C-alpha cells in the first residue's frame, strides 16, 4: 500500500518491465495490472509466477472499455 492508500496500479506500456519491477520493490502489497502488447519482452512469461501482477498483452485502446 502506498502512503496515499493506493493498492493497485495500472501501467500502460511496460516495455521490459523495469518500472513494474521497481513498483513491486518499493510498494509492498501493491497489485499491478500491465497493458502492453509485449513487443519488447514476454511480460506474460516474466510475471507468470507473480500473483500481484496481471498482464494484458494488448494495446491500451483495445482494452479501453474494460478500464
Image (cartoon, grey):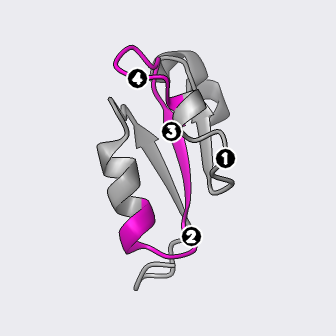
**x 37%, y 40%: residue:** 17
CA distance for labels 1 and 3: 15 Å
The residue that mark 1 highlights is: 49
- The local secondary structure at tag 3 comes to strand
Q: Quadrant of residue 56?
A: top right
Quadrant where the C terminus is found in the figure: top right
Of the numbered discs 2 and 1, the one sitting upstream in the chain is 2
Query: Does 2 appear above or below 56?
Result: below
Image: magenta residue range: 24-43
- Residue that carries the numbered disc 2 in the rendered image: 7
Relative height, residue 40 to residue 67 (above, below): above
Assess whether mark 2 and mark 4 are in contact (beta carbons under 8 angstroms): no
What separation in Å lies between label 1 and label 4 (alpha carbons)? 16 Å
Callout 1: few (<14), some (14-19), or many (20+) C-alpha neighbours within 10 Å? few
At horizontal 38% and vertical 53% (from top left) the residue drawn is 21
Along the polypeptide, which appears first: circle 1 or circle 4? 4
What is the secondary structure assignment of the residue under circle 1? loop
Sequence-wise, the earlier of marks 3 and 4 is 3
Q: How many marks?
A: 4
**Displayed quadrant of residue 12:** top left
Q: Secondary structure at mark 4?
A: loop
Does residue 64 show up magenta in the picture? no
Residue 42 spot, x, y in % from top left: 49, 23
| C-alpha distance separating marks 4 and 2 | 25 Å
Q: Residue furthest bottom?
A: 3
Q: Residue at x 57, y 74 (%)?
A: 29
Q: Residue at x 50, y 30 (%)?
A: 43
Amino acid at each position: 500500500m502506498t502512503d496515499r492508500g493506493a493498492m493497485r496500479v495500472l501501467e500502460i506500456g511496460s516495455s521490459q518491465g523495469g518500472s513494474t519491477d521497481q513498483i513491486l520493490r518499493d510498494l509492498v502489497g501493491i497489485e499491478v495490472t500491465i497493458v502492453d502488447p509485449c513487443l519488447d519482452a514476454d511480460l506474460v512469461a516474466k510475471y507468470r509466477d507473480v500473483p500481484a501482477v496481471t498482464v494484458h498483452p494488448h494495446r491500451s485502446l483495445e482494452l479501453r472499455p474494460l478500464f
